[in-house]
Image (cartoon, rainbow, N blue to C red):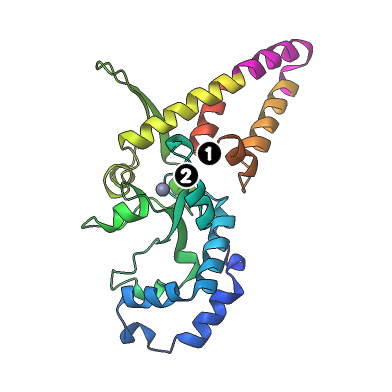
Amino acid sequence: MIWIDKNLNNEPEEFKLWKKNKLSENWFNEKKPSEWWQEINKETKVKKALQSALLEEQGHICCYCCRKITNDQAIIELQNKDEQNRILQISVEHYQEKVNPNYMKKMFDYDNLLASCKSSSYCNEFRGKQKIQDLTLNPTKLESMDQIEVLYEFDKSKDKKNLVKLTSKNELIQHDLDHVLNLNNIDLAQKRKILVVKIQNDYAEKIKLYANFARDISENEYMDFTKQELEEKYLQKKHEGNTKKYPSSFPFVAKMVLENLFE
Ligand SMILES: [Zn+2]
């Protein structure tokens, strides 16, 4: 997962205008949440503008699993069967669920909307099938993201599948990861592992270079240099370089791997 810098200035004009024209004072009493959402789904331009704003804000990755997502139907249809690098379809996520009567009034609030993937096995769609859907974990809050750690798990069973899981000392967040969002299912855990190996291989050469470089400069300069590299490549808000290099990207994992490598 990765922190999302949610900004109300990113809300598209088309969406604001649609709300202004469509929503009466008592709109929430007029239709069921799902019927209201159908209304926006019918407005192709508004829907596309909203999706595009959310995608841009998050660097085109899912707010939970961090797989790459798109609202471009042509991209989805033209993909080959390369599952590791597959780009998933976007699903607009209501952080506070629209089906919960307490939150229905927030269903068109831009700060409650996130871009998720449309996988039926995890994230938004999986959450929608659970009895209790409230989340403690919140990708828009840094203090929430700071509580997630990466766990390398070596499976000694005969198929020897190494996994990379997400964990937290906060039991509620751990519950969200495992049961509400299903982010530690074997498919995602293996994909993370493949990415970790790829980053480690890509960086093995670079680390050798750093080691040579470090001999000639002071310790402080060396630290600054590696930190700058990390920030430039892996902490930028838009993740563009990152997602290009690692198409099925898990930037959070990438960041952790690199931090460990450079420690
Ligand atoms: Zn996802």
Q: CA distance from mark 2 to mark 1?
A: 7 Å
Q: Residue 188 appears at what percent x and percent y? A: 37, 37
Query: How packed is label 1: few (under 14 Cα within 10 Å), some, or many (20 or more)?
Result: many
Circle 1 residue: 251
Q: Is mark 2 within 8 Å of ligand 1?
A: yes
N-terminal of the pair, mark 2 or mark 1, is 2
Q: Is residue 121 above or below residue 232?
A: below
Residue at 61 percent of width and 39 percent of height: 244
List the residue tagged with mark 2: 66
The three-letter code of the residue at mark 1 reads: Pro
Helix, strand or loop at label 2? It is: loop
Is residue 8 located in the magenta-colored stretch of the structure? no
205 relative to 183 in the view: left or right? right
Prevalent SS, magenta region: helix
Q: Residues within 10 Å of mark 2 (few under 14, many from 20)?
A: many
Indicate the position of residue 237 as horizontal and vertical percent values.
62, 48
* Callouts 2 and 1 close, C-beta under 8 Å: yes
Q: Is residue 206 magenta?
A: yes
Give the answer, above or below, for where 83 lies relative to 161: below
Q: Quadrant of the N terminus?
A: top left
Q: Amino acid at mark 2?
A: Cys
The answer to whether residue 83 of the structure is visible from this angle is yes
The residue located at (34%, 65%) in the rendering is 97
Q: Is residue 116 left or right of residue 159?
A: right
In-front residue for pair 102/35: 35
**Vertical arrangement, residue 121 with respect to residue 28, above or below:** above
Numbered tag placed on residue 209 in the rendering: none
Rendered-image quadrant of the C terminus: top right
Magenta residues? 204-220
Residue furthest to the right in view is: 216
Residue 10 location (% of width, % of height): 60, 65
